[in-house]
Amino acid sequence: MAWKKEILQLLGKEKVLFDAASRGKFSKDYYWYSPILTQKLKDKLADCIAFPESEEELVSLISFAVKRKIPITVRGAGTGNYGQAVPLQGGIVIDMTRFHQVLEIGENAVTVQAGIRIGKLERILERNGKELRIMPSTYIQATIGGFVAGGSGGIGSITWGNLWDGNVHSASVYTIEEKPRKIVVSGDKLEQYIHNYGTLGVMTELQLPIEEKTDWMQAMVFHDHLDEAINFAHQFSGIETMKKRLLSVCEGALTKHFAPLKQYILPEKTLTMIEVDEKAKSEFVELVAEHKGILAHTIPAKQYRKGVRLSDFTWNHSTLWACKNEDNITYLQVEFDIQHLYHQVHLLKKEFGGEVLLHFEFIKRNGAIIPTALPVVRFTSEKRLYEIIQFFLNIGAKVHDPHTYLLGFGGWSLRMDEIIKIKQKNDPFHLLNPGKIADVTSYAQV
Ligand code: FAD
């Protein structure tokens, strides 16, 4: 590699890795959930992995890459599911985890470096009587920069919605130019920087809203039938007097995979996993009884995140447990409409039976309850998978396809025209995460 010596001089040998094992490890994320992405991405490899520790180092690294026209892919913890952090065209993977400082904790917002792991940030906030609004179920590993650039929602979304719903205040971003510019993006302009797979710049700092810490109690509730559990979740999500952070409904056949919860699982019954304000416990217990649910296990707030964490079985963790237990498991990302949900679920179960196991994450967006879902699918072929996706679309569900690494093709209503405009300014040589924006030809010609 022609530039090995130069980059070593730039950062020092402690901060650049060239060995095959590291290149392999840091060139992957959790794309292996998708057999389709696995085929496409398994051989992609960075030339080296860089670990800058300061903005000065980052700026000189970007400047060096631009002069030499070397592709750059930014990485947080590499827990993304669509190959977002996979270097499609080799080059330098920049690991951001050494940017891990909390810069300021205010009354309503926290400012952090983008590579801080969310779990660490939560612990620090907790000591200050505060907490984040939303985070992915991978919060222990995942970085805040990776969440903003690669994620969507998660724990907390039942109250606060997704990343786009006012859950990021501002981002400091370095452009990919010979003289990188640091820009601060806020307000409406932030929309294009969320879930853009790090294609518009390297984020170094983020400001996020925070809330007073709540004492979260965790609960496992069982119902005989999926319909009953959905009805319970629907009612519960509409009750404002009970603060909640998690509302996850899993079909009975899926719960057999949740080995660490085995002693509490009631086989074949639908499981709802909940995080609710402990102050609302009696109201919550009453609601469960009213809905003929079985409250099989509760974890008091003082044990929150100390032993078993129910969130480890929600969001895309449910799929992970199924993948651990069975071959040929994959998943979809779906949004239903609460008005038609019961009918849609009925149609899906009739059509697919055990081939598609339903798992819902209820979220709230602008006051509206939205049953999102990460159905677990028994994979047989790409053709069959897309037949299943088509069925979801035909019955009026929205699918965010997790089997593509192309930005904009997975749904989420991204404004690709705006993203491409900003890309031209921030990354004029198209060196940042190249290959993730499909329309490169027209982009290059504009
Ligand atoms: P990475 O995977 O490292 O990166 C993600 C994207 O962000 C990449 O495109 C990368 O280039 C870019 N990026 C990273 N850092 C920066 C930066 N500083 N500047 C610019 N771009 C950057 N996602 C959810 O939204 N909600 C969930 O609840 C959820 N649950 C999950 C459960 C499991 C078991 C798994 C495997 C994944 C889950 N995910 C979920 C996906 C993923 O874990 C999250 O989106 C996570 O926040 C990604 O963070 P990361 O640090 O690992 O990012």
Image (cartoon, helix red, strand yellow):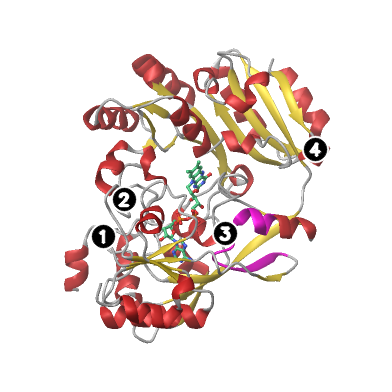
Mark 4 residue type: Glu
Q: Is residue 269 left or right of residue 388?
A: right
State which region is magenta. 108-122
Q: Which residue is mark 2?
A: 405
Residue 204 or residue 233, whichever sits in front: 204
Q: Position of residue 82 (x, y in %)?
A: 37, 48
Q: Position of residue 109 (x, y in %)?
A: 68, 66
User: Which of the two marks, 4 or 1, is nearer to us in this view?
Assistant: 1
Which of the numbered marks, if any, corresponds to residue 288?
none
Which quadrant holds the N terminus? bottom left
The residue lying at 50 percent from left, 31 percent from top is 321
Q: Is mark 1 within 8 Å of ligand 1?
A: no
Q: Indicate which disc, 3 or 1, sits on the residue closer to the N terminus.
A: 3
Q: Which residue is mark 3?
A: 166
Q: Indicate which disc, 1 or 2, sits on the residue closer to the N terminus.
A: 2
Q: Quadrant of residue 270?
A: top right
Q: CA distance from mark 4 to mark 3?
A: 26 Å
Q: CA distance from mark 3 to mark 1?
A: 29 Å
In the displayed structure, would residue 273 be above or below residue 363?
A: above
Mark 3 residue type: Gly
Q: Residues within 10 Å of mark 1 (few under 14, many from 20)?
A: some
Q: Tag 3's secondary structure?
A: loop
Q: Are marks 4 and 3 in contact (CB under 8 Å)?
A: no
